[in-house]
């Protein structure tokens, strides 16, 4: 039995996302509420700016005498330029910012600005299924889910718009026209040099592509919208099932996230397309199952990187591969002639 | 009842029938391995193993699922069942299908995030850094009071806040030494802690001038949880890491290992506390040192997906270094960002441009379990493996106290045995590739046996040693290790193209032959696994093979998968600076070792 990594490329699934405040605050929705992607579901005050002011050093006094010369008490508000401490006629020590004097000791004081309000949005359309008062909200929806491999940027919402005819075509800047304003645009194998600039000009909400050349990683990390790369870094065509699923939903509103964490609480970039549950049959696949004949898989290393197919047999002993290594693997029908052999370690189940 | 003394521990023997089969698991960042040991013919032997992707993440979210998956593979081979239908471990019942003891090691947790503070970067801070490297930790910021780290107090507080550490480790002040700067550092750390939400607030570990402990307690009181350890740098020349390492290891156990999904169940199954993999690995190196030449050291390198562990023993003292974020999957991109592509590609026998290197390394991070199916990608992974080991060794070596095992201060100490563990080293398509990676990265000197932990058993056996030492010892002796090669590495000042070593090999069947090895060459002589031979070594031009300059001698050596390697390429190893020449050189060396 072999239990490969699972990647969700699913036409209909229950999607559950926990929305967590960075610091304790206030939850604004209740169990059972319907929420929209841009709706604020919780808010908190995150700690603001601070300054450490070395009063004793500035006044030339021993640290132990700090209290004697302070003009403001701990907990009191201060304005920028307000005298915080003074000794006789010497130059006073002034506050460098508006805030509250929150601590004193060891010859210095700590001044903190007022906390900054932080608003947590729902991210996706759905129903609130749990509320951890003051900390987090759980939202669930039913819809299609596509998990990517690499991503950049945060979260956004937009209408899916396909700009290429097939998954092996690159996304070109000339294809991005004003109709892409506010859309999540879908390409194939990579993008040309002008795409990111053009997409910013037209305020697209996100880009989904099969592969991204490594030279464009830095630029992709700087754009203000999320990017989801479905297969990996390199000029790799989008795998067939991913392209077909996204193309099927062209014109629908989707949520997109470019967030990524490859280990210790894995977070994958994703596209969620909420749909009315009753319109499609329920998803039957069980997560966490071993690899079996008939499973839909994707190969994740060259020479078949990004190619999806069906497992036709699982070898019961090791075979020699191109590197001369002997590994256990499976035969995969990629739909193009003879099945190929791929190491088990290089397969992902597409659920 | 032949009791043996190993690492100071009295052991019972296999005749003690209270423990039968032993199932051991190691939950790594990407792979979980399970090993079954059992008594066969009155001795413990390795019976079978299973290996499967670690299941800490979706859809399982429970490391014990991976243990069950790997155990299923053992069941398929042995016909024995280890788990009930409910998923619970079958322990010590009356049937044959039972596990008497279960023990686990783990390295799948996130490392401890550490901010280090000290007075002098090359003294107390360096010692604190080595203390942190004794466990799975990631140093996210360093605050030194000397010129190079001279930040204002506010900048230090910001640095700590940004680093969001689990622990701030403050060293500094020799015994009876500096006072004020140490206390200022503690005060800054406490101030930074007070600005962090209580739930995320780091602990402070004080490992500086012990005279100041009471004042440190007063300063930190109410602002952070304080732990105190012995001064890591009590004098200019002395380092005392053990106590601080224990504290950090304890924090790792409490704060990180316990957070691993499924750890509660794993702990409940286990007869002994779940041990960090690196610690268990180090335990076996200590055992091996007691078996070998005490004037030399023993070293083990475990190259994992996330971490590289270097465990060395000199004079009976263990030195453990874990280089977190410096593994075969999660290390390459970091090396690329900090040192550029050439630090990796210089080890490759083919040209690969930086953009391709970058893309492949990012993809490997995204799919850490995947393996190269194409030769170029294999060369890249093996190049990353070399650099990861080399970088880890650079961190480890300054903390070693090799004593007489160090005849050449700027080179590696003499090591009797080097144990090589981790899939990228043990699953190479050809054994010569593994040997060459180790020789390039670690550059041993003298005569060394390279031993392959073929089945990834070393951490598991290290943990078994805590339950049943004799089982670990007998399993080690029963073929868990595979000899990779015996290596002779002469050291000296070369004359161009000169013969530096004459070797005569006498096989047990009476046949013999001799070779003269030129400086700069890598010679592989046949000596298959299971065979032994007597070597007569005659170094020239004052070259040293570990017996002193110019001194030769006889040595009985064992064969290995590669054979007998004479590595006369020089120490430190120098690669041609011109790219084409370097490529040809790498191709030549790879050819020489049969890679």
Image (tube, rainbow, N blue to C red):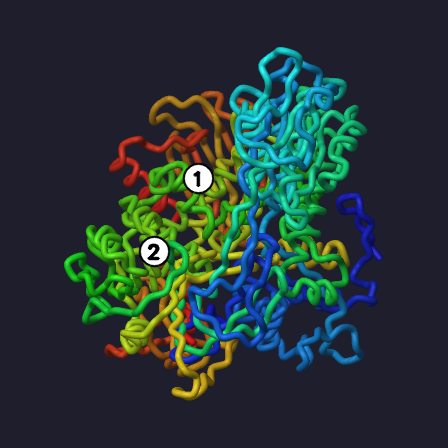
For image coordinates 33% across by 76% down, the residue present is A309
Q: How many marks?
A: 2
Q: Is residue A77 left or right of residue B474?
A: left
Nearest-to-viewer mark from 2 and 1: 2
Determine the residue located farthest toward the top in the rendered image.
A89
User: Viewer-proximal residue, B74 or A8?
Assistant: A8
Q: Which residue is mark 1?
A: B440
Rendering coords of residue B539 (x, y %): 48, 27
Among the 4 quarters of the image, the one containing residue B77 = bottom right
For image coordinates 49% across by 21% down, the residue present is B542
Depicted B255 relative to depicted B206: above or below: below
Rendering coords of residue B55 (x, y %): 56, 66
Q: Which residue is mark 2?
A: A225
SS of the residue under disc 2: loop
Q: Chain of mark 2?
A: A
For image coordinates 66% across by 43% down, the residue present is B202
Q: Which mark is residue B284?
A: none
Rendering coords of residue B185 (x, y %): 65, 27
Q: Chain of mark 1?
A: B
């Amino acid at each position: 039995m072999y239990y490969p990594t699972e990647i969700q490329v699913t036409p209909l699934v229950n999607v559950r996302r926990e929305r967590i405040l960075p610091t304790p605050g206030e939850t604004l929705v209740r169990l059972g509420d319907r929420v929209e992607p841009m709706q604020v579901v919780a808010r908190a005050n995150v700690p603001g700016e601070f300054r450490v002011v070395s009063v004793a050093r500035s006044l030339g006094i021993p640290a132990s005498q700090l209290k004697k010369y302070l003009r403001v008490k701990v907990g009191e508000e201060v304005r920028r330029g307000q005298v915080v401490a003074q000794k006789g006629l010497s130059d006073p020590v002034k506050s460098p910012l508006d805030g509250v004097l929150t601590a004193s000791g060891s010859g210095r004081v700590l001044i903190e600005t007022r906390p900054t309000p932080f608003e947590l949005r729902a991210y996706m359309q759905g129903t609130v299924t749990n509320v951890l008062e003051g900390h987090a909200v759980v939202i669930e929806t039913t819809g299609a889910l596509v998990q990517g491999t690499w991503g950049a940027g945060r979260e956004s919402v937009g209408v899916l718009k396909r700009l290429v005819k097939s998954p092996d075509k690159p996304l070109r800047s000339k294809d991005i026209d004003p109709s892409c304003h506010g859309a999540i645009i879908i390409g194939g194998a990579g993008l040309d040099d002008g795409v990111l600039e053009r997409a910013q000009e037209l305020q697209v909400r996100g880009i989904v592509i099969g592969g991204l050349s490594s030279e464009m990683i830095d630029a992709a990390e700087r754009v203000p919208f999320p990017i989801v790369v479905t297969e990996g870094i390199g000029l790799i065509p989008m795998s067939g099932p991913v392209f077909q699923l996204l193309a099927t939903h062209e014109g629908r509103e989707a949520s997109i996230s470019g967030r990524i964490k490859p280990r210790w609480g894995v977070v994958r970039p994703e596209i969620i397309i909420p749909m009315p549950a009753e319109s499609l049959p329920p998803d039957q696949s069980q997560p966490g199952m071993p690899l079996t004949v008939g499973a839909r898989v994707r190969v994740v290393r060259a020479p078949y990187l990004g190619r999806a197919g069906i497992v036709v047999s699982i070898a019961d002993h090791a075979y020699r591969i191109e590197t001369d290594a002997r590994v256990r693997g499976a035969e995969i029908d990629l739909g193009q002639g003879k099945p190929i052999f791929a190491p088990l370690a290089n397969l992902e189940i597409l659920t | 009842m032949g009791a043996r003394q190993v690492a100071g521990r009295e052991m019972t023997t296999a005749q003690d029938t209270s423990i039968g089969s032993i199932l051991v698991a190691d939950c790594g960042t990407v792979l979980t391995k399970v090993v079954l040991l059992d008594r066969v013919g009155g001795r413990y032997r390795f019976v079978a193993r299973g290996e499967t992707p670690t299941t800490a993440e979706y859809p399982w979210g429970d490391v014990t699922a991976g243990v069950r998956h790997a155990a299923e593979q053992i069941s398929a081979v042995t016909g024995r069942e280890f788990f009930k239908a409910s998923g619970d471990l079958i322990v010590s019942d009356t049937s044959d299908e039972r596990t008497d003891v279960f023990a686990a090691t783990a390295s799948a947790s996130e490392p401890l995030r550490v901010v280090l503070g000290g007075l002098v970067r090359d003294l107390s801070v360096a010692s604190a850094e080595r203390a942190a490297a004794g466990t799975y930790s990631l140093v996210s910021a360093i605050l030194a009071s000397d010129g190079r780290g001279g930040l204002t107090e506010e900048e230090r507080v910001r640095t700590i806040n940004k680093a969001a550490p689990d622990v701030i480790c403050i060293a500094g002040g020799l015994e009876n030494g500096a006072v004020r700067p140490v206390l200022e550092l503690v005060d800054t750390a406490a101030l930074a802690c007070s600005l962090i939400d209580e739930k995320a607030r780091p602990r402070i570990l004080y490992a500086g001038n012990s005279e100041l402990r009471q004042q440190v307690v007063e300063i930190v009181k109410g602002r952070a949880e304080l732990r105190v350890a012995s001064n890591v740098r009590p004098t200019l020349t002395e380092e005392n890491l053990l106590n601080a390492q224990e504290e950090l290891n304890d924090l790792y156990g409490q704060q990180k290992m316990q957070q691993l999904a499924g750890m509660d169940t794993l702990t409940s199954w286990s007869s002994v506390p779940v041990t960090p993999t690196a610690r268990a690995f180090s335990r076996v190196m200590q055992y091996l040192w007691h078996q070998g030449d005490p004037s030399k050291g023993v070293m083990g390198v475990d190259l994992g997906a996330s971490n590289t562990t270097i465990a060395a023993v000199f004079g009976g003292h263990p030195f453990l270094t874990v280089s977190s974020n410096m593994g075969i999957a999660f290390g390459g991109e970091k090396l690329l960002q900090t040192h550029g592509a050439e630090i990796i590609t210089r080890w490759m026998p083919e040209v690969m441009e930086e953009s391709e290197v970058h893309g492949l390394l990012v993809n490997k991070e995204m799919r850490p379990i995947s393996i190269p199916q194409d030769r170029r990608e294999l060369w890249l992974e093996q190049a990353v493996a070399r650099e990861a080991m080399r970088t880890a060794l650079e961190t480890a070596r300054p903390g070693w106290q090799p004593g007489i095992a160090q005849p050449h201060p700027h080179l590696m100490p003499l090591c009797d045995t080097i144990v090589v563990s981790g899939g990228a080293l043990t699953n190479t398509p050809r054994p010569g590739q593994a040997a060459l990676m180790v020789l390039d990265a670690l550059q041993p000197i003298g005569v060394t046996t390279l031993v392959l932990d073929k089945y990834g058993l070393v951490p598991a056996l290290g943990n078994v040693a805590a339950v049943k030492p004799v089982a670990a010892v007998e399993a080690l002796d029963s073929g868990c290790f595979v000899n990779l090669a015996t290596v002779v590495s002469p050291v000296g000042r070369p004359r161009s193209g000169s013969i530096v070593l004459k070797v005569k090999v006498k096989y047990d069947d009476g046949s013999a032959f001799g070779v003269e090895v030129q400086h700069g060459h890598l010679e592989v002589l046949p000596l298959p696994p299971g065979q032994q031979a007597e070597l007569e070594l005659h170094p020239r031009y004052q070259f040293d093979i570990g017996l002193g300059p110019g001194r030769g001698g006889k040595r009985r050596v064992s064969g290995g998968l590669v054979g007998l390697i004479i590595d006369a390429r020089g120490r430190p190893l120098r690669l041609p600076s011109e790219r084409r020449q370097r490529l040809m050189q790498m191709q030549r060396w790879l050819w020489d070792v049969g890679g």
